[in-house]
Image (tube, rainbow, N blue to C red):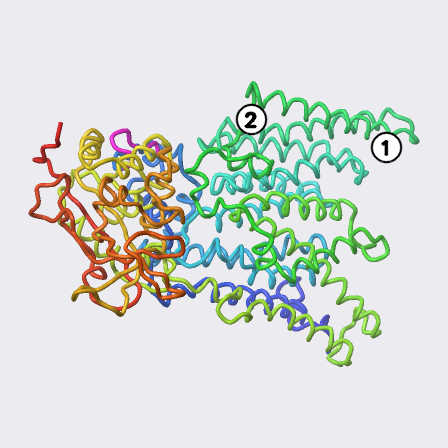
């Protein structure tokens, strides 16, 4: 029985055994992706990270009020007292898509539960899209390899785990689907089909951009590809209407949304597509009127001229800004040599530059097969069945994907997509070579041979190793972490209810017109779960306001009290993490602080507030000085006091800080409920009050004391 054997017929379609294989592999890939992404559910079924809580709230607003009201929504519970124009500052298509799909498939589930599962389902469905996309380049076998590799790709899974109701999963889904429709459209032999596909591609790709701003990086390979088309395709008449139609549709729909909006269309993003399209039209005209022997030369001269002029325009624009530019983090990805001067940008973990160790861990074996894939694509004898334009796009996407991902860890998804494409082509052709050498050919039968079995065993082992080794730091285990709200984003791999209980306490025990001051990380949690107004949140709309929070925390208590009243804050929330030691001092338990909460972020508070670190920190860059603990509001709000310093390597102790020594703390609440200080501690979470040895996290709610009389 061969893979081409008919099983049954549906209408005029013959369902063969190879179709069953395709469905089976895609179902397996979907299942593997779903299971790996869902590991965090073991700790609790919650939204993960910070942004998903706002996205949930925005989706809920659409369902309760309608899309028209959503576009008019000015959220007065955030960025007090200014509020926020939601549709102009959000991933609109994420909210609309989630609302529409919830109405279609939500059934009896709550919206909260639906949004928890949304990224897992969308992310896992993307295996089908990448199968279709890569199939255009290397055939069905390459597409199946791509689906399997995508299902275990660590950078992609990390940006789409259960509860990760953020922009990347849907943005990637729309982006890959738009890319598939675009390439499929310009490959189509049927003009009507091509027309539908290129228009759909422009619309879907713009949806991707309105879901996640990172999708604009797909414009780079598309723009370069359009520049190459006159040299690798002969059907110039078809290209003359299909490419401009795609670009016009994409820019038109993108311009309709407030974000990315007209600044994108008439800025560097639109420029990156309009200029290549104009070149394609001009090059086609020049080649048409040129002699045969001069067509390529004249086209290349025009291309070089366009590149030189474009480079000049970009350089001039850097000074005059006549073309609107994307935000710094996107420019930094295009030009990795740019240096950030904004500590707020630098403080975000996902904006960290990718190290060589991280790149190898993320991609490991894919790097090898991607390199083989590049060699195979450049080898004419191995890819005679691959169209030249698809070869060019595969190389362009591979190179640009790796390039843009070198700046931010968050953008490693593009390197992963690029390497998956190249590796899949490589694996497909290598497999075909083995089949060809064993004279199995196109009529594969269920006979086996040692070399063929060895090939597949080696392939399986190579990809299983990074998924299982090392035991606690492989592609699967690193995703097995609790939702951020269950451990506060600390390094402790445990789930607690501290934040959930605190947010519920705020909701039920503070006035509805309360205004909460906290570090911007926790703004979305407070607004969504506690339904209280916040000064700042994760939208980072105003660096000045976030900087003001940092200055409040680092000011002396009297000045901080004045600043809190000027800002309109009624309560302050801080978050502390550490570990309780199995020893006591004078009957009091001892602690060390550190784990990822505010005690670990204080150095970023100082950088953002533009304060000298040496004033607040010892030479290790982490341990607080006496000034920090005794003279700043943050030091006073942390309910701990230093009693000694300990060197855990040689078991020495010191009353003062020395390099290599760790501060040891005991509990001490400095602003209690009955006190007369600038703040009153009105709530502390349960883990802080428990006396368990090991990891400890504590969330603290302070009320601003309106009766406090600061010294003059």
State the quadrant of the N terminus.
bottom right
Q: Position of residue 205 (x, y in %)?
A: 56, 41
**Where does the magenta region start and end?**
78-85
Q: Position of residue 325 (x, y in %)?
A: 53, 28
Q: Nearer the viewer, residue 637 or 617?
A: 617
Q: Residues within 10 Å of mark 1 (few under 14, many from 20)?
A: some
Q: Which residue is at 39% across, 37% downward?
A: 607
Q: Are marks 2 and 1 in contact (CB under 8 Å)?
A: no
Res. 108 in view: no
Mark-to-mark CA distance, 2 and 1: 31 Å
Q: Nearer the viewer, residue 406 or 16?
A: 406
Task: Give the quadrant of residue 23.
Answer: bottom right
Q: Nearer the viewer, residue 318 or 223?
A: 318
Sequence-wise, which precedes: disc 2 or disc 1?
2
Q: Which residue is at 32% across, 32% downward?
A: 545
Image position of 399 (left or right of 705): right
Disc marking residue 125:
none
Q: Residues within 10 Å of mark 2 (few under 14, many from 20)?
A: some
* Residue position marked by numbered label 1 in the rendering: 296
Q: Nearer the viewer, residue 118 or 344?
A: 344
Q: Position of residue 606 (x, y in %)?
A: 36, 38
Q: Determine the main secondary structure of the stretch shown in magenta.
A: loop
Depicted 549 relative to depicted 625: above or below: above
Image position of 327 (left or right of 697): right
Judging from the image, what secondary structure is the residue with disc 2 in?
loop
Depicted 224 relative to depicted 7: above or below: above
State the quadrant of the C terminus.
top left
Task: Give the quadrant of residue 55.
Answer: top left
**Residue 427 is a magenta residue:** no
Res. 361 in view: yes
Task: Give the quadrant of residue 139.
Answer: bottom right
* Residue position marked by numbered label 2 in the rendering: 267
């Amino acid at each position: 029985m061969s893979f081409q054997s008919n099983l049954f017929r549906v209408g005029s379609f013959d369902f063969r055994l190879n179709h069953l294989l395709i469905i089976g592999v895609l179902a397996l890939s979907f299942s593997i992706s779903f299971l790996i992404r869902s590991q965090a559910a073991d700790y609790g079924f919650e939204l993960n990270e910070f942004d998903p809580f706002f996205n949930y709230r925005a989706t809920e607003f659409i369902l309760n009020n309608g899309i028209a009201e959503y576009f008019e929504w000015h959220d007065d519970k955030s960025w007090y007292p200014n509020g926020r124009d939601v549709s102009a500052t959000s991933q609109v298509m994420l909210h609309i898509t989630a609302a529409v799909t919830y109405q279609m498939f939500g059934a009896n589930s709550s919206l909260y539960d639906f949004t928890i599962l949304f990224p897992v389902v969308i992310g896992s469905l993307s295996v089908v899209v990448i199968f279709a996309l890569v199939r255009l380049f290397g055939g069905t076998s390459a597409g199946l390899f791509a689906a399997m590799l995508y299902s275990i790709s660590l950078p992609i899974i990390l940006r789409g785990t259960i509860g990760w109701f953020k922009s990347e999963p849907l943005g990637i889904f729309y982006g890959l689907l738009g890319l598939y429709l675009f390439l499929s459209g310009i490959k189509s032999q049927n003009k009507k089909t091509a027309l539908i596909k290129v228009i759909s591609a422009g619309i879907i790709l713009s949806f991707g951009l309105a879901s996640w701003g990172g999708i604009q990086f797909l414009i780079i390979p598309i723009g370069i590809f359009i520049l190459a088309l006159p040299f690798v395709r002969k059907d110039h008449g078809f290209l003359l209407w299909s490419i401009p139609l795609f670009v016009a549709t994409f820019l038109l729909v993108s311009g309709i949304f407030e974000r990315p909006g007209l600044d994108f269309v008439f800025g560097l993003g639109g420029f990156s597509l309009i200029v290549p399209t104009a070149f394609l039209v001009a090059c086609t005209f020049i080649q048409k009127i040129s002699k045969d022997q001069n067509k390529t030369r004249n086209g290349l001269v025009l291309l070089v001229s366009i590149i030189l002029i474009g480079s000049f325009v970009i350089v001039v624009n850097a000074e005059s800004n006549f073309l609107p530019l994307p935000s710094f983090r996107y420019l930094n990805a295009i030009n990795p040599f740019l240096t950030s001067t904004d500590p707020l940008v630098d403080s975000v973990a996902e904006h960290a530059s990718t190290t060589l160790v991280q790149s190898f861990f993320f991609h490991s074996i894919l790097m090898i097969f991607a390199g083989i894939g590049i060699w195979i694509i450049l080898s004419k004898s191995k890819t005679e069945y691959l169209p030249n334009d698809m070869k060019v796009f595969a190389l362009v996407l591979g190179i640009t994907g790796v390039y843009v991902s070198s700046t931010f860890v968050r953008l490693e998804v593009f390197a992963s997509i690029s390497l998956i494409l190249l590796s899949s082509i490589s694996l497909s052709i290598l497999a075909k070579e083995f089949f060809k050498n064993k004279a199995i050919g196109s009529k594969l039968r269920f006979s086996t041979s040692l070399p063929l079995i060895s090939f597949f065993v080696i392939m399986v082992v190579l990809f299983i190793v990074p998924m299982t080794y090392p035991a606690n730091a492989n592609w699967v285990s690193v995703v097995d972490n609790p939702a951020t709200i269950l451990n506060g984003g600390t390094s402790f791999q445990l789930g607690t209810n501290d934040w959930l209980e605190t947010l519920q306490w705020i909701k039920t025990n503070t006035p509805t017109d309360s205004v909460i001051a906290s570090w911007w990380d926790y703004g979305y949690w407070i607004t969504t779960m506690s339904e209280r107004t916040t000064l700042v949140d994760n939208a980072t709309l105003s660096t000045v306001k976030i900087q003001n929070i940092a200055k409040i925390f680092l000011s002396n208590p009297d000045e901080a009290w004045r600043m809190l009243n000027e800002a309109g804050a009624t309560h302050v929330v801080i978050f502390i993490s550490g570990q309780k030691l199995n020893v006591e001092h004078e009957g009091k338990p001892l602690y060390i602080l550190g784990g990822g909460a505010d005690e670990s972020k204080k150095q970023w508070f100082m950088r953002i507030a533009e304060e000298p670190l040496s004033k607040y920190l010892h030479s290790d860059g982490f341990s607080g000085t006496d000034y920090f603990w005794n003279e700043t509001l943050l030091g006073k709000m942390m309910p701990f006091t230093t009693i000694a310093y300990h060197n855990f390597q040689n078991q020495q102790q010191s009353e003062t800080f020395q390099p290599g020594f760790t501060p040891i703390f005991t509990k001490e609440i400095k602003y209690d409920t009955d006190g007369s200080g600038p703040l009153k501690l009105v709530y502390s979470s349960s883990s802080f009050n428990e006396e368990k040895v090991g990891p400890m996290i504590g969330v603290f709610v302070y009320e601003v004391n309106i009766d406090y009389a600061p010294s003059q």
